[in-house]
Amino acid sequence: MLGNDDWWRDAVVYQVYPRSFADANGDGMGDLEGVRGRLDYLAGLGVDAIWLSPFYTSPMADGGYDVADYRDVDPMFGTLADFDALVADAHAKGIRVIVDLVPNHSSDQHPWFKSGLRERYIFRDKPNDWESIFGGPAWTQVEDGQWYLHLFAPEQPDLNWDNPDVRAEFRDVLRFWLDRGVDGFRVDVAHGMIKAEGLPDVGPKDGPQAEMLGDEQVPYFDQDGVHDIYREWRPILDSYPGGRMAVAEAWVSSPERLARYVGPDELHQAFNFDFMMADFHAKSFRTVIEKALKEAELVGAPTTWVLSNHDKPRHVTRHGGLARARAATLLMLALPGSAYLYNGEELGLPEVLDLPDELRQDPAFLRRGESRDGCRVPIPWSADPGCGWRDPWLPIPAEWTGLSAEAQEDDPDSTLNLYRAALRIRKRHPALGGASSGTLTWLESAKDVLVIERDPGLVVVLNTGEEPVRLDWTGQVLLSSGPLETDGSVPPDTAIWFQR
Ligand code: GLC
Protein backbone atom coordinates (compact mmCIF):
# COMPACT_ATOMS: atom_id res chain seq x y z
CA MET A 1 0.00 0.00 0.00
CA LEU A 2 2.88 2.37 0.81
CA GLY A 3 4.94 1.28 -2.17
CA ASN A 4 5.41 4.44 -4.19
CA ASP A 5 8.80 6.08 -3.51
CA ASP A 6 7.65 9.37 -4.98
CA TRP A 7 4.60 9.59 -2.74
CA TRP A 8 5.65 12.99 -1.34
CA ARG A 9 5.47 14.73 -4.71
CA ASP A 10 1.72 15.26 -4.58
CA ALA A 11 1.01 14.26 -0.98
CA VAL A 12 -1.37 16.03 1.36
CA VAL A 13 0.48 16.21 4.67
CA TYR A 14 -1.34 17.09 7.90
CA GLN A 15 0.68 18.87 10.57
CA VAL A 16 -0.06 17.67 14.08
CA TYR A 17 1.02 20.08 16.83
CA PRO A 18 1.08 17.38 19.51
CA ARG A 19 0.23 19.34 22.65
CA SER A 20 -2.84 20.82 20.96
CA PHE A 21 -4.15 17.95 18.87
CA ALA A 22 -5.78 15.30 21.06
CA ASP A 23 -5.42 14.34 24.70
CA ALA A 24 -5.80 10.64 25.54
CA ASN A 25 -4.83 10.74 29.23
CA GLY A 26 -6.90 13.79 30.20
CA ASP A 27 -4.05 15.94 31.54
CA GLY A 28 -4.93 18.92 29.35
CA MET A 29 -1.99 18.36 27.02
CA GLY A 30 -2.22 16.44 23.75
CA ASP A 31 -0.20 13.23 23.44
CA LEU A 32 0.83 10.48 21.00
CA GLU A 33 -1.97 8.18 22.14
CA GLY A 34 -4.34 11.03 21.35
CA VAL A 35 -2.98 11.14 17.81
CA ARG A 36 -3.31 7.37 17.49
CA GLY A 37 -6.92 7.61 18.64
CA ARG A 38 -7.66 10.07 15.81
CA LEU A 39 -6.12 8.11 12.96
CA ASP A 40 -9.54 7.10 11.65
CA TYR A 41 -10.50 10.76 11.56
CA LEU A 42 -7.32 11.53 9.60
CA ALA A 43 -7.84 8.60 7.24
CA GLY A 44 -11.44 9.77 6.72
CA LEU A 45 -10.19 13.26 5.99
CA GLY A 46 -8.05 11.71 3.27
CA VAL A 47 -4.52 12.85 4.15
CA ASP A 48 -1.50 10.91 2.90
CA ALA A 49 0.80 11.66 5.81
CA ILE A 50 1.07 13.36 9.16
CA TRP A 51 3.96 15.56 10.24
CA LEU A 52 4.40 15.54 14.00
CA SER A 53 5.87 18.72 15.48
CA PRO A 54 8.37 17.84 18.26
CA PHE A 55 7.31 15.33 20.90
CA TYR A 56 10.86 14.75 22.16
CA THR A 57 12.08 15.18 25.72
CA SER A 58 11.86 18.90 26.31
CA PRO A 59 11.46 21.49 29.07
CA MET A 60 9.05 23.22 26.59
CA ALA A 61 10.71 26.62 26.58
CA ASP A 62 9.66 26.81 22.91
CA GLY A 63 6.81 24.33 22.65
CA GLY A 64 9.17 21.38 22.20
CA TYR A 65 11.51 23.05 19.67
CA ASP A 66 13.99 22.95 22.54
CA VAL A 67 15.06 19.32 22.54
CA ALA A 68 16.79 17.76 25.54
CA ASP A 69 16.97 14.24 24.07
CA TYR A 70 16.71 13.68 20.33
CA ARG A 71 16.08 9.97 20.78
CA ASP A 72 13.21 9.88 23.26
CA VAL A 73 9.60 10.93 23.78
CA ASP A 74 8.78 13.41 26.52
CA PRO A 75 6.65 11.74 29.23
CA MET A 76 4.01 14.41 28.68
CA PHE A 77 3.53 13.00 25.16
CA GLY A 78 4.00 9.31 26.02
CA THR A 79 6.75 6.78 25.41
CA LEU A 80 8.77 5.34 22.55
CA ALA A 81 6.41 2.37 22.64
CA ASP A 82 3.49 4.78 22.04
CA PHE A 83 5.42 6.22 19.12
CA ASP A 84 6.00 2.79 17.62
CA ALA A 85 2.33 1.93 18.04
CA LEU A 86 1.35 5.19 16.35
CA VAL A 87 3.63 4.53 13.36
CA ALA A 88 2.39 0.94 13.04
CA ASP A 89 -1.28 1.95 13.15
CA ALA A 90 -0.78 4.91 10.83
CA HIS A 91 0.97 2.71 8.27
CA ALA A 92 -1.76 0.10 8.55
CA LYS A 93 -4.25 2.83 7.59
CA GLY A 94 -2.09 4.03 4.69
CA ILE A 95 -0.90 7.19 6.47
CA ARG A 96 2.81 8.00 6.46
CA VAL A 97 4.59 9.66 9.37
CA ILE A 98 7.04 12.56 9.17
CA VAL A 99 8.81 13.79 12.30
CA ASP A 100 10.39 17.15 13.10
CA LEU A 101 14.16 17.37 13.34
CA VAL A 102 15.64 20.33 15.21
CA PRO A 103 19.35 20.48 14.32
CA ASN A 104 20.11 24.20 14.67
CA HIS A 105 19.91 24.23 18.45
CA SER A 106 19.25 21.95 21.39
CA SER A 107 17.69 22.72 24.73
CA ASP A 108 19.97 24.15 27.42
CA GLN A 109 18.82 21.07 29.35
CA HIS A 110 20.42 18.74 26.81
CA PRO A 111 23.16 16.68 28.53
CA TRP A 112 25.77 18.13 26.13
CA PHE A 113 25.07 21.65 27.30
CA LYS A 114 24.54 20.75 30.93
CA SER A 115 27.74 18.73 31.15
CA GLY A 116 29.79 21.52 29.60
CA LEU A 117 30.62 20.07 26.17
CA ARG A 118 31.20 23.62 25.01
CA GLU A 119 32.85 22.61 21.74
CA ARG A 120 29.42 21.38 20.61
CA TYR A 121 28.00 24.90 20.98
CA ILE A 122 29.16 28.37 19.97
CA PHE A 123 30.94 30.05 22.86
CA ARG A 124 32.88 33.34 22.57
CA ASP A 125 34.68 35.74 24.90
CA LYS A 126 32.62 38.63 23.56
CA PRO A 127 29.22 38.76 21.80
CA ASN A 128 28.78 40.27 18.33
CA ASP A 129 25.75 42.32 17.22
CA TRP A 130 23.49 39.40 16.29
CA GLU A 131 19.90 39.53 17.53
CA SER A 132 17.62 36.67 18.54
CA ILE A 133 14.68 35.99 16.22
CA PHE A 134 12.54 36.18 19.36
CA GLY A 135 13.95 39.64 20.20
CA GLY A 136 16.92 40.90 22.22
CA PRO A 137 20.56 39.90 21.83
CA ALA A 138 21.40 36.43 20.49
CA TRP A 139 24.04 35.93 23.22
CA THR A 140 23.83 35.00 26.87
CA GLN A 141 26.72 35.10 29.35
CA VAL A 142 27.56 32.18 31.66
CA GLU A 143 29.24 32.24 35.07
CA ASP A 144 32.84 32.23 33.84
CA GLY A 145 32.19 35.27 31.64
CA GLN A 146 31.90 33.46 28.29
CA TRP A 147 28.91 34.02 25.99
CA TYR A 148 26.95 31.45 23.99
CA LEU A 149 24.97 32.00 20.82
CA HIS A 150 21.22 31.38 20.64
CA LEU A 151 19.43 32.58 17.51
CA PHE A 152 16.16 31.82 19.30
CA ALA A 153 15.49 31.74 23.08
CA PRO A 154 18.39 31.60 25.59
CA GLU A 155 17.11 28.11 26.44
CA GLN A 156 17.96 27.10 22.84
CA PRO A 157 21.77 27.27 22.44
CA ASP A 158 22.92 26.97 18.81
CA LEU A 159 24.87 23.84 18.01
CA ASN A 160 28.33 24.02 16.48
CA TRP A 161 28.10 22.24 13.15
CA ASP A 162 31.85 22.63 12.58
CA ASN A 163 32.23 19.99 15.27
CA PRO A 164 32.40 16.49 13.72
CA ASP A 165 30.78 14.92 16.80
CA VAL A 166 27.65 17.03 16.30
CA ARG A 167 27.48 15.90 12.68
CA ALA A 168 27.96 12.26 13.62
CA GLU A 169 25.29 12.49 16.34
CA PHE A 170 22.71 13.85 13.92
CA ARG A 171 23.46 11.24 11.29
CA ASP A 172 22.78 8.74 14.03
CA VAL A 173 19.58 10.50 15.10
CA LEU A 174 18.33 10.28 11.51
CA ARG A 175 19.01 6.55 11.49
CA PHE A 176 17.36 6.13 14.90
CA TRP A 177 14.01 7.41 13.60
CA LEU A 178 14.36 5.85 10.14
CA ASP A 179 14.91 2.50 11.86
CA ARG A 180 11.66 3.09 13.74
CA GLY A 181 9.90 3.43 10.42
CA VAL A 182 9.41 7.16 9.92
CA ASP A 183 8.80 8.23 6.33
CA GLY A 184 10.56 11.54 6.54
CA PHE A 185 11.70 14.63 8.40
CA ARG A 186 10.66 18.23 8.52
CA VAL A 187 13.95 20.05 9.09
CA ASP A 188 13.53 22.96 11.50
CA VAL A 189 15.46 26.16 10.69
CA ALA A 190 17.10 24.29 7.83
CA HIS A 191 18.89 27.47 6.75
CA GLY A 192 20.52 28.04 10.14
CA MET A 193 23.16 25.54 11.12
CA ILE A 194 26.22 27.10 9.50
CA LYS A 195 27.32 30.61 10.44
CA ALA A 196 29.64 32.85 8.39
CA GLU A 197 33.34 32.38 9.13
CA GLY A 198 34.47 34.55 12.08
CA LEU A 199 30.88 35.45 13.04
CA PRO A 200 30.99 38.95 11.48
CA ASP A 201 28.66 41.70 12.71
CA VAL A 202 25.50 42.35 10.72
CA GLY A 203 26.27 46.06 10.92
CA PRO A 204 23.99 49.10 10.85
CA LYS A 205 20.34 48.52 10.08
CA ASP A 206 16.97 50.25 10.21
CA GLY A 207 14.98 47.87 12.39
CA PRO A 208 15.15 44.50 14.08
CA GLN A 209 17.40 42.02 12.28
CA ALA A 210 14.52 39.52 12.20
CA GLU A 211 12.86 41.81 9.65
CA MET A 212 15.89 41.85 7.34
CA LEU A 213 15.81 38.16 6.60
CA GLY A 214 13.49 38.46 3.63
CA ASP A 215 15.59 41.03 1.80
CA GLU A 216 19.22 40.19 2.18
CA GLN A 217 21.56 37.65 3.58
CA VAL A 218 22.52 37.81 7.23
CA PRO A 219 25.73 36.06 8.34
CA TYR A 220 23.87 33.44 10.34
CA PHE A 221 21.35 32.18 7.80
CA ASP A 222 21.45 30.51 4.38
CA GLN A 223 25.22 30.02 4.30
CA ASP A 224 26.65 27.74 1.62
CA GLY A 225 27.88 25.24 4.22
CA VAL A 226 24.37 24.06 5.12
CA HIS A 227 24.21 22.32 1.77
CA ASP A 228 27.14 20.07 2.73
CA ILE A 229 25.05 18.82 5.64
CA TYR A 230 22.16 17.88 3.35
CA ARG A 231 24.55 16.16 0.98
CA GLU A 232 25.66 14.08 3.98
CA TRP A 233 22.07 13.26 4.92
CA ARG A 234 20.61 12.41 1.55
CA PRO A 235 22.49 9.10 1.10
CA ILE A 236 21.24 8.07 4.55
CA LEU A 237 17.62 8.71 3.54
CA ASP A 238 18.17 6.97 0.21
CA SER A 239 19.64 3.92 1.89
CA TYR A 240 16.23 3.10 3.42
CA PRO A 241 13.45 1.55 1.33
CA GLY A 242 10.07 3.08 0.63
CA GLY A 243 10.76 6.71 -0.24
CA ARG A 244 12.04 8.43 2.94
CA MET A 245 12.01 12.18 2.43
CA ALA A 246 12.91 15.51 4.03
CA VAL A 247 11.31 18.93 3.75
CA ALA A 248 13.16 22.11 4.70
CA GLU A 249 11.83 24.96 6.76
CA ALA A 250 14.10 27.59 5.25
CA TRP A 251 13.34 31.30 5.36
CA VAL A 252 15.58 32.68 2.64
CA SER A 253 15.63 35.80 0.51
CA SER A 254 14.34 34.45 -2.83
CA PRO A 255 12.79 31.42 -4.51
CA GLU A 256 16.14 30.89 -6.27
CA ARG A 257 17.89 30.59 -2.89
CA LEU A 258 15.14 28.24 -1.67
CA ALA A 259 15.56 26.02 -4.71
CA ARG A 260 19.16 25.34 -3.65
CA TYR A 261 17.88 23.19 -0.77
CA VAL A 262 16.06 20.84 -3.11
CA GLY A 263 17.49 18.25 -5.46
CA PRO A 264 18.51 14.64 -5.86
CA ASP A 265 21.54 15.11 -3.59
CA GLU A 266 19.95 17.37 -0.94
CA LEU A 267 16.41 17.59 0.41
CA HIS A 268 13.22 16.55 -1.37
CA GLN A 269 11.20 19.67 -0.71
CA ALA A 270 11.27 23.09 0.91
CA PHE A 271 8.27 24.94 2.23
CA ASN A 272 7.12 27.65 -0.11
CA PHE A 273 6.15 30.28 2.43
CA ASP A 274 5.49 32.96 -0.20
CA PHE A 275 2.12 31.35 -0.84
CA MET A 276 1.30 31.40 2.86
CA MET A 277 2.30 35.06 3.11
CA ALA A 278 0.41 36.20 -0.02
CA ASP A 279 -2.64 38.46 0.39
CA PHE A 280 -6.05 37.13 -0.51
CA HIS A 281 -5.99 38.62 -3.98
CA ALA A 282 -5.89 37.12 -7.47
CA LYS A 283 -2.81 39.11 -8.40
CA SER A 284 -0.72 38.25 -5.35
CA PHE A 285 -1.65 34.58 -5.59
CA ARG A 286 -0.76 34.50 -9.28
CA THR A 287 2.62 36.15 -8.68
CA VAL A 288 3.70 33.64 -6.01
CA ILE A 289 2.31 30.64 -7.88
CA GLU A 290 4.16 31.58 -11.08
CA LYS A 291 7.40 32.09 -9.17
CA ALA A 292 7.08 28.80 -7.32
CA LEU A 293 6.33 26.86 -10.48
CA LYS A 294 9.34 28.35 -12.24
CA GLU A 295 11.55 27.25 -9.36
CA ALA A 296 9.96 23.81 -9.30
CA GLU A 297 10.83 23.42 -12.95
CA LEU A 298 14.42 24.44 -12.25
CA VAL A 299 14.91 21.83 -9.55
CA GLY A 300 12.80 19.14 -11.22
CA ALA A 301 10.61 18.65 -8.16
CA PRO A 302 7.11 19.94 -7.53
CA THR A 303 6.73 22.61 -4.93
CA THR A 304 4.83 22.68 -1.64
CA TRP A 305 1.85 24.80 -0.66
CA VAL A 306 0.99 25.92 2.86
CA LEU A 307 -1.74 28.23 4.15
CA SER A 308 -1.29 27.85 7.91
CA ASN A 309 1.15 26.41 10.42
CA HIS A 310 2.05 26.67 14.11
CA ASP A 311 4.08 29.87 13.61
CA LYS A 312 1.64 32.15 11.77
CA PRO A 313 -1.89 33.40 12.44
CA ARG A 314 -4.46 30.98 11.01
CA HIS A 315 -5.51 31.79 7.46
CA VAL A 316 -9.18 32.24 8.33
CA THR A 317 -8.10 35.34 10.24
CA ARG A 318 -5.23 36.39 7.97
CA HIS A 319 -7.33 36.24 4.82
CA GLY A 320 -10.33 37.96 6.42
CA GLY A 321 -12.92 35.32 7.20
CA LEU A 322 -14.03 31.76 6.68
CA ALA A 323 -15.40 32.22 3.15
CA ARG A 324 -12.02 33.43 1.92
CA ALA A 325 -10.14 30.73 3.80
CA ARG A 326 -12.31 28.06 2.18
CA ALA A 327 -11.75 29.60 -1.24
CA ALA A 328 -7.97 29.80 -0.73
CA THR A 329 -8.01 26.16 0.33
CA LEU A 330 -9.65 25.06 -2.92
CA LEU A 331 -7.02 27.03 -4.82
CA MET A 332 -4.20 25.42 -2.84
CA LEU A 333 -5.50 21.89 -3.19
CA ALA A 334 -5.74 22.23 -6.98
CA LEU A 335 -2.13 23.34 -7.49
CA PRO A 336 0.55 20.92 -8.70
CA GLY A 337 2.77 19.66 -5.88
CA SER A 338 2.11 18.73 -2.30
CA ALA A 339 -0.02 20.57 0.25
CA TYR A 340 0.64 20.88 3.99
CA LEU A 341 -2.42 21.36 6.19
CA TYR A 342 -2.24 22.56 9.78
CA ASN A 343 -4.38 20.80 12.38
CA GLY A 344 -7.69 22.56 12.82
CA GLU A 345 -7.73 24.34 9.48
CA GLU A 346 -10.11 21.64 8.23
CA LEU A 347 -12.53 22.87 10.91
CA GLY A 348 -12.17 26.47 9.77
CA LEU A 349 -10.68 27.55 13.09
CA PRO A 350 -9.81 31.23 13.35
CA GLU A 351 -6.83 32.65 15.21
CA VAL A 352 -7.64 33.17 18.91
CA LEU A 353 -6.84 36.83 19.39
CA ASP A 354 -7.95 37.44 22.96
CA LEU A 355 -5.90 34.99 25.02
CA PRO A 356 -5.06 36.60 28.36
CA ASP A 357 -1.39 37.63 28.40
CA GLU A 358 -0.68 35.65 31.55
CA LEU A 359 -1.66 32.42 29.77
CA ARG A 360 0.50 32.97 26.71
CA GLN A 361 3.50 30.69 26.57
CA ASP A 362 5.32 31.57 23.36
CA PRO A 363 8.88 32.73 24.15
CA ALA A 364 8.54 35.19 21.26
CA PHE A 365 5.72 36.86 23.20
CA LEU A 366 7.78 37.11 26.34
CA ARG A 367 10.74 38.68 24.48
CA ARG A 368 9.20 40.54 21.55
CA GLY A 369 5.49 40.89 22.37
CA GLU A 370 4.40 38.83 19.35
CA SER A 371 2.62 35.63 20.22
CA ARG A 372 2.05 32.46 18.22
CA ASP A 373 -0.20 30.99 20.90
CA GLY A 374 -3.39 32.00 19.09
CA CYS A 375 -2.91 29.34 16.42
CA ARG A 376 -1.95 26.70 18.99
CA VAL A 377 -5.21 26.55 20.95
CA PRO A 378 -6.33 22.91 21.33
CA ILE A 379 -8.53 21.36 18.64
CA PRO A 380 -12.25 21.22 19.50
CA TRP A 381 -13.38 17.64 19.04
CA SER A 382 -16.80 17.39 20.59
CA ALA A 383 -19.75 19.73 20.94
CA ASP A 384 -19.80 19.57 24.75
CA PRO A 385 -18.76 22.72 26.66
CA GLY A 386 -15.12 21.57 27.05
CA CYS A 387 -14.91 20.58 23.35
CA GLY A 388 -13.67 17.18 24.50
CA TRP A 389 -10.83 18.56 26.68
CA ARG A 390 -10.45 18.69 30.44
CA ASP A 391 -8.44 21.71 31.58
CA PRO A 392 -6.62 22.30 28.26
CA TRP A 393 -3.20 24.00 28.39
CA LEU A 394 -4.69 26.99 26.57
CA PRO A 395 -8.39 27.85 26.99
CA ILE A 396 -10.69 26.91 24.08
CA PRO A 397 -13.15 29.69 23.13
CA ALA A 398 -16.72 28.82 24.17
CA GLU A 399 -18.03 29.36 20.63
CA TRP A 400 -15.74 26.62 19.28
CA THR A 401 -18.27 23.97 20.33
CA GLY A 402 -20.02 24.92 17.08
CA LEU A 403 -16.79 24.44 15.13
CA SER A 404 -15.99 21.09 16.71
CA ALA A 405 -15.43 18.03 14.55
CA GLU A 406 -18.56 16.52 16.07
CA ALA A 407 -20.71 19.54 15.23
CA GLN A 408 -19.44 19.53 11.63
CA GLU A 409 -19.57 15.80 11.05
CA ASP A 410 -23.01 15.55 9.46
CA ASP A 411 -23.34 19.03 8.03
CA PRO A 412 -22.77 18.74 4.27
CA ASP A 413 -21.76 22.41 4.07
CA SER A 414 -19.26 22.28 6.92
CA THR A 415 -15.62 23.13 6.35
CA LEU A 416 -14.69 19.63 7.50
CA ASN A 417 -16.82 18.14 4.74
CA LEU A 418 -15.42 20.61 2.20
CA TYR A 419 -11.89 19.39 2.99
CA ARG A 420 -13.01 15.77 2.85
CA ALA A 421 -14.67 16.27 -0.52
CA ALA A 422 -11.69 18.20 -1.90
CA LEU A 423 -9.21 15.51 -0.83
CA ARG A 424 -11.44 12.78 -2.25
CA ILE A 425 -11.66 14.49 -5.63
CA ARG A 426 -7.96 15.36 -5.57
CA LYS A 427 -7.09 11.73 -5.12
CA ARG A 428 -9.13 10.38 -8.00
CA HIS A 429 -9.24 13.17 -10.53
CA PRO A 430 -6.67 12.59 -13.28
CA ALA A 431 -5.81 16.30 -13.40
CA LEU A 432 -4.89 16.46 -9.71
CA GLY A 433 -3.40 13.15 -8.68
CA GLY A 434 -0.04 11.61 -9.33
CA ALA A 435 -0.97 11.02 -12.97
CA SER A 436 -0.93 14.72 -13.75
CA SER A 437 2.07 16.33 -15.40
CA GLY A 438 2.26 19.00 -12.75
CA THR A 439 1.54 21.80 -15.17
CA LEU A 440 -1.21 24.36 -15.19
CA THR A 441 -2.55 26.88 -17.68
CA TRP A 442 -3.77 30.35 -16.83
CA LEU A 443 -7.01 31.11 -18.64
CA GLU A 444 -8.14 34.59 -19.43
CA SER A 445 -10.11 36.13 -16.61
CA ALA A 446 -11.73 39.29 -15.35
CA LYS A 447 -9.81 41.55 -12.99
CA ASP A 448 -9.47 40.11 -9.45
CA VAL A 449 -10.31 36.63 -10.68
CA LEU A 450 -8.00 33.66 -11.16
CA VAL A 451 -8.89 30.98 -13.66
CA ILE A 452 -6.56 28.01 -13.88
CA GLU A 453 -6.89 24.89 -15.98
CA ARG A 454 -5.38 21.60 -14.92
CA ASP A 455 -5.33 19.12 -17.73
CA PRO A 456 -7.60 17.21 -18.39
CA GLY A 457 -10.52 19.53 -18.07
CA LEU A 458 -10.42 20.76 -14.47
CA VAL A 459 -10.92 24.49 -14.20
CA VAL A 460 -10.38 26.33 -10.94
CA VAL A 461 -12.03 29.71 -10.55
CA LEU A 462 -11.19 31.96 -7.62
CA ASN A 463 -13.08 35.23 -7.29
CA THR A 464 -11.29 37.75 -5.06
CA GLY A 465 -13.19 40.70 -6.53
CA GLU A 466 -16.44 42.40 -5.61
CA GLU A 467 -18.71 41.20 -8.44
CA PRO A 468 -19.96 37.70 -9.21
CA VAL A 469 -18.20 35.96 -12.12
CA ARG A 470 -20.20 34.32 -14.89
CA LEU A 471 -19.02 30.98 -16.22
CA ASP A 472 -18.87 30.63 -20.01
CA TRP A 473 -18.20 26.93 -20.30
CA THR A 474 -20.47 23.96 -20.33
CA GLY A 475 -19.75 21.33 -17.77
CA GLN A 476 -20.29 20.66 -14.16
CA VAL A 477 -19.30 22.21 -10.84
CA LEU A 478 -17.44 19.48 -8.94
CA LEU A 479 -16.96 21.45 -5.76
CA SER A 480 -17.60 24.94 -4.53
CA SER A 481 -16.19 26.67 -1.46
CA GLY A 482 -19.55 28.39 -0.86
CA PRO A 483 -23.04 28.84 -2.34
CA LEU A 484 -23.20 30.00 -5.97
CA GLU A 485 -25.55 32.69 -7.32
CA THR A 486 -28.92 31.46 -8.61
CA ASP A 487 -27.67 31.84 -12.21
CA GLY A 488 -24.59 29.75 -11.36
CA SER A 489 -22.16 32.69 -11.17
CA VAL A 490 -19.30 32.51 -8.68
CA PRO A 491 -19.78 35.11 -5.92
CA PRO A 492 -16.97 37.15 -4.35
CA ASP A 493 -14.65 35.29 -1.93
CA THR A 494 -15.55 31.96 -3.51
CA ALA A 495 -13.67 29.30 -5.48
CA ILE A 496 -14.96 26.40 -7.53
CA TRP A 497 -13.60 23.31 -9.20
CA PHE A 498 -15.34 22.93 -12.55
CA GLN A 499 -15.22 19.98 -14.95
CA ARG A 500 -15.51 20.92 -18.61
C1 GLC B 1 11.01 27.02 13.68
C2 GLC B 1 9.74 26.51 14.31
C3 GLC B 1 9.32 27.44 15.39
C4 GLC B 1 10.44 27.50 16.43
C5 GLC B 1 11.76 27.87 15.78
C6 GLC B 1 12.91 27.59 16.69
O1 GLC B 1 10.82 28.22 13.04
O2 GLC B 1 8.75 26.34 13.32
O3 GLC B 1 8.13 27.07 16.00
O4 GLC B 1 10.13 28.45 17.40
O5 GLC B 1 12.00 27.09 14.63
O6 GLC B 1 13.10 26.21 16.81
Image (spheres, helix red, strand yellow):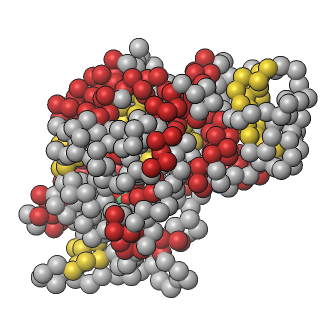
Is residue 240 rendered to the left or right of residue 407? left
Quadrant containing the N terminus is top left
Residue 174 figure quarter: top left
Which percent across, then down, holds residue 22? 33, 38
Quadrant containing the C terminus is top right
| Above or below 458: residue 492 | below
Which percent across, then down, holds residue 142? 17, 78
Give ligand 1's quarter of the image: bottom left
Residue 434 figure quarter: top right
Q: Residue at x 41, y 58 (%)?
A: 373
Q: Can residue 311 be seen here?
A: yes
Is residue 345 rendered to the left or right of residue 39? right
Residue nearer the viewer, 364 or 494: 494
Which percent across, then down, holds residue 442? 80, 37
Q: Residue at x 43, y 28 (%)?
A: 42
Q: Residue furthest top?
A: 1
Which percent across, then down, holds residue 457? 77, 21
Q: Can residue 454 be seen here?
A: no
Q: Residue at x 74, y 33 (%)?
A: 483
Q: Residue furthest left?
A: 115
